[in-house]
């Protein structure tokens, strides 16, 4: 049997819970759940809890960012070389997974690049132009155990040092 109060207020707008906007099923008048209103009606609470107020920085669109554009160019170049038959499947997957090229990666893959005709070997020295593969910068991670003469737009000092210690050279184009 229903309570008389419930029966009495059926048909009213709020069923006895006060204002219609505070019909919150026993949670009180909190002004939103979680961090809602932290910079509006809960502003003082935000200051006391130490929230940073305001916007900081700007994220440039992916179309404009030079690092993402360089990665896209490398991947497009590698796809074209694979279509032309200048890259085998293994070399393509190896290079495609690396948006930037390290000296260790180059030392590891240089023999395959010579087989595919993208690099040359003169005696004990390998010659390679990284712009053919789409790379613009050579980084210094890894070990170099072969003499490599590299032509590239940019190279880190560590990369230049490691290649020169191994008997090669870096030519900045």
Image: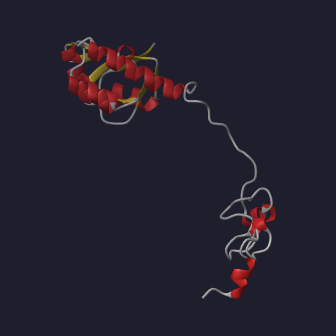
Task: Give the camera-side residue of 31 and 108.
Answer: 31
Task: Please identify the quarter of the rendering in which residue 11 is found.
Answer: bottom right
Residue 30, percent from left and from top = 74, 69
Residue 84 in sight: yes
Asked if 24 appears above or below 143 in the picture, the reply is: below
Residue 170, percent from left and from top = 39, 19
Is residue 148 left or right of 17 when viewed as pictured?
left
Q: Quadrant of the N terminus?
A: bottom right
Report the coloring of the rendering.
secondary structure
**Residue at coordinates 54% horizontally, 25% vertically from top-left?**
66
Task: Please identify the quarter of the rendering in which residue 101 is found.
Answer: top left
Is residue 53 left or right of 96 when viewed as pictured?
right
**Residue at coordinates 26% horizontally, 11% vertically from top-left?**
84
Is residue 80 left or right of 125 when viewed as pictured?
right
Task: Please identify the quarter of the rendering in which residue 29 is found.
Answer: bottom right
Asked if 6 appears above or below 40 in the picture, the reply is: below
**Residue at coordinates 34% horizontally, 26% vertically from top-left?**
163
Residue 16, percent from left and from top = 76, 77
């Amino acid at each position: 049997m229903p309570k008389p109060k419930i029966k009495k207020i059926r048909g009213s707008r709020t069923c006895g819970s006060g204002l219609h906007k505070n019909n919150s099923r026993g949670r009180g008048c909190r002004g939103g759940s979680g961090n809602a209103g932290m910079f509006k009606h809960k502003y003082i609470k935000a200051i006391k809890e130490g929230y940073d107020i305001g916007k900081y920085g700007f994220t440039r669109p992916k179309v404009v960012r030079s690092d993402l554009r360089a990665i896209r160019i490398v991947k497009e170049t590698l796809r074209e070389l694979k279509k032309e038959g200048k890259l085998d499947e293994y070399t393509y997957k190896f290079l495609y997974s690396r948006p930037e090229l390290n000296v260790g990666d180059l030392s590891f893959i240089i023999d395959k690049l010579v087989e595919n005709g993208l690099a040359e070997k003169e005696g004990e020295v390998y010659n390679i132009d990284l712009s053919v593969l789409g790379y613009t910068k050579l980084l210094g991670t890894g070990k170099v155990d072969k003499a490599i003469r590299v032509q590239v737009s940019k190279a880190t000092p560590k990369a230049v040092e490691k290649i020169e210690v191994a008997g090669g050279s870096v030519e900045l184009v």
